Structures are given as structure tokens and as C-alpha cells.
Image: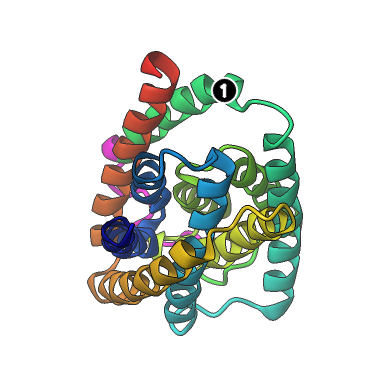
Amino acid sequence: MDSTIIILCIVAFFAGFVDSIVGGGGLIQTPAGLILLPNNPVAQVIGSLKIPSFSGTLFAAAAFLKKVKIPFARIVLFTSIAFTASYTGSLCLTMVSNAFMKPVIFIVLIAIAMYTFSEKKFGQKTKNENLTFPWYKGALICLVIGFYDGFIGPGAGSLLVIAFIALLGFDFLQANAHAKVVNLATNMGSIVLFIMKGAILWHIALPMAICNAVGGIIGSRMALSKGNRFIRTVFLWVIIATLCRLGYDVFLH
């Protein structure tokens, strides 16, 4: 068991590193947890992995917020909606299968990858210098992707980044800062539900949380220093990895 925890901690570090740059850390962490903990219920594994995801995102969010200022009222609005939506999504997951949604998400991600690859200026410059927009647009993003994170999960952070760029006109750095804050709330929504159901393996979750946080700190500093072009490159790789994961679920699993 000790060797399993060590491997999961290493995985958590890399997941935190990738997640802090552009989201998608769950693509690394979740499969590893399911493979290395085959005798535990899936809900228990997924619930436990939400703890390190939260810790890594917390430190990454703190780093981004030093560079990108988000009004407090917007943070309260976004996180409240995202928390409620994610909790609801996780609750639905305990009652019904999410398999029917995966082919739809798979097609959407193909379109996103093709557009991002072909549109070289996507997210490189802000179209929204003042970071202002109709409040309902941001609220709708948090509602839809918050529910998605609780119900399905893979690539939610990346989808938040895409939505903030495409719908609100942010660049990658601005979108990342907002996505990290919202992702904190979506993780917490799921965590509250799984704690209530007693589905957290704390002896595994806490060491992984420390490693994920270290990865998040290093990754966010690298993203802030290297800027939009670096984030775009990592973003494309994460989208491709998400496609591979969902493609396996849809066509092979």
C-alpha cells in the first residue's frame, strides 16, 4: 500500500503542474487512481481525488490572482453558481450514468481542438481590456461547466478556459485566473457531497493533496512567466489528451 501511495503522490504532482497551467489535471490523476486502487468503489476513488485537485487549484488560483484582479462580487457570484451546479452534477452521478453525454462532449472537443490549432491568435490577446461583460454570460458558463465537472469531469478546467476566451473575450492568462477560481468551487461542491457520503480515503487524499499543491505552485509560476503562447501549447496537448480519454470511454470501454 505504501508504494501505491508514493506512486499516486508522484502522479498528483504532475497533475497539479498541468492543471495549474491550463486545467486537465484530472486526465492524469483519475485514470491512475482507478488503476492503482482497483478494489475500492469508483465513487470512493473519485471522491478522494477531489481533495488533491482542490489543493493544487487553490495555490494556482492564489498565484494567478496576484496578476489578474477579479472583482470580489464576481468571485462570489461565479463560485456560488459553480458550487451549486457541481454539487448537483455529482448528486446526479450517484443516481444515473453519464455515458450518454460522452459522445457529445467528444465531438465538441474535436471542434475546439481544430479551431484552436487553426486560429493562431485564439487567446493570445485580450478583446476585453476592462474584463467587463454581461453578468449572465459568466453565470451561464459557471452553471453549465460546473454541472459538467460534477457529473462527468474530464477537462472541465480546459472547458472553462475556452468559454472565458470565446464568450467573454479574455486572453489565456485572464481566462486561466477566472477558471481557477471557478474550478475551486466546482471541486468543493463535489467534495461536500462525497464527504457526506463517507467516500473520502483521507490517508491517500491528504499526501496527494500536498504533492498536487507543490505541482500547482510550480506550474502556475511557469505559466505566468512564459505567458499566453506557452499556455496555448499546453492547452492543445491537454485537449488532445482529453479526446483520447473520452474516445476510449466512448468507443473501447
Q: What residue sits right under mark 1 in the picture?
A: 99
Can you say whether 86 is above or below 241 in the image? below
Q: Is mark 1 on a helix, strand or loop?
A: helix
Residue plotted at (63% across, 45% down):
150
Residue plotted at (75% across, 66% down):
77
Picture coordinates of residue 252, whole percent (x, y): 36, 16
Quadrant of res 213: bottom left
Can you say whether 76 is above or below 252 in the image? below
Colour pattern = rainbow
The main secondary structure of the magenta stretch is: loop
Residue plotted at (32% across, 63% down):
9
Q: Is residue 243 left or right of residue 155?
A: left
Quadrant of res 106: top left
Quadrant of res 184: bottom right
For the C terminus, which image quadrant? top left
Res 103 seen here:
yes
Number of residues whose C-alpha sits closer than 10 Å to that of mark 1, classed few (under 14), some (14–19) or many (20 or more): few
Q: What span is in magenta?
A: 117-127
Q: Which amino acid does label 1 sit on?
A: Ala
Picture coordinates of residue 135, whole percent (x, y): 74, 59
Picture coordinates of residue 146, whole percent (x, y): 65, 49
Q: Does the magenta stretch include residue 174?
A: no
Residue plotted at (29% across, 44% down):
236
Q: Is residue 223 left or right of residue 129?
A: left
Picture coordinates of residue 191, whole percent (x, y): 64, 59
Res 128 seen here:
no
For the N terminus, which image quadrant? bottom left
Q: Is residue 43 left or right of residue 250?
A: right
